[in-house]
Image: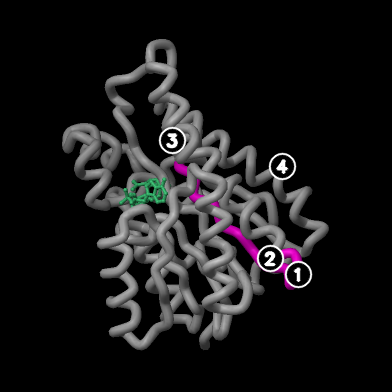
Amino acid sequence: MARFAGRSVIVTGAAQGIGAAYAAALAAEGAKVVVADKNAEGGQAMVEKITADGGTAVFGQVDVSDPESATALAELTVAEFGGIDHLVNNAAIYGEMKVNLLLTVPWDYYKKFMSVNMDGALNMTRAVWPHMRKTGGSIVNQSSTAAWMYASFYGLAKVGINGLTQQLAFELGGSNIRINTIAPGPIDTEATKAVTPGVIVEDMVNRLPLKRMGTPADLVGACLFLLSDEAGWVTGQIFNVDGGQVF
Ligand code: NAI
């Protein structure tokens, strides 16, 4: 069953990792996908992969922290696919989480980090709203279980994503747009390998009820469900997909 046949979907941060898995799965279910990312080379490669698998995708270069760039991406999507039905706000950076405390992180660094990890989702939502409000649709944000444990400014940004989801549910509901958030536990991606020392990962995994790291594929079902019409009366929710890490 092609749940997203003919639907136009933007996935940010889709050049690699979890966003790439979402983009590929949506295309496999019939969606026309905008692979949106700062990284043009990785984004183009992802488009080629989706197209080779028989799906429909274009690359849209975007810096989600920049409102003008977000608006240009929304306009590109409408020009390519005739409208916008769904948005996945997945793009984020990890930063030097282990080095910088909230108490001492340099302001410039903090503001840059928040402009991507928190404001990015709002920028993108504001950019798509004038288009999505014509037809209704749905949005999925990407939080993290880091919102419920100590993770310095990375955790703070994810608390912001959760709050944004709940507040925007009210503002978007009148336009028949739903918005929900997935909060993944530790997911095995190249990016997490690079920022998280193996010993910390091992300790985290040992404390999970389901004793393994998650994979991007573990998140796909939740993302597609929350975007789809099957979740037609679900909005403002934070959905943990985390091997039981937080309950
Ligand atoms: P990743 O680093 O592999 O991919 C992130 C993508 O976002 C990259 O392609 C990057 O180029 C893009 N990006 C970064 N800044 C951007 C910007 N300003 N504008 C446009 N694109 C930008 O990350 P990963 O691991 O796939 O994570 C994806 C999302 O899932 C993030 O929101 C992350 O916080 C969240 N998450 C990840 C977990 C994990 O263990 N991997 C766990 C919980 C949440």
The residue that mark 3 highlights is 146
Mark 4 or 3: in front is 4
- Measured Cα–Cα span from mark 3 to mark 1: 35 Å
- Residue at 68%, 44% in the rendered image: 166
Whether residues under marks 1 and 4 lie with C-beta atoms below 8 angstroms apart, the answer is no
Q: Which residue is mark 1?
A: 134
The answer to if 137 sits in the magenta stretch is yes
Q: Find the distance from the CA under tag 4 to the CA under tag 2.
A: 20 Å
Q: Are the residues at dot 2 and dot 1 in contact (C-beta closer than 8 Å)? A: yes
* 56 lies above or below 25: below
Three-letter amino acid code at the position of disc 4: Gln
Mark 1 → mark 4, Cα distance in angstroms:
21 Å
> Taking the image as drawn, is residue 177 in sight?
yes
- Secondary structure of the residue carrying numbered label 2: helix
Q: Is mark 3 within 8 Å of ligand 1?
A: yes
Q: What residue did someone put label 4 on? A: 167
Q: Secondary structure at mark 1?
A: loop
Q: Earlier in the sequence, mark 2 or mark 3?
A: 2
Vertical arrangement, residue 179 with respect to residue 165, above or below: below
Residue 121 locus on image (x, y percent): 55, 47
The one nearer the camera, 80 or 221, is 80
**Which residue in the protein does label 2 denote?**
131
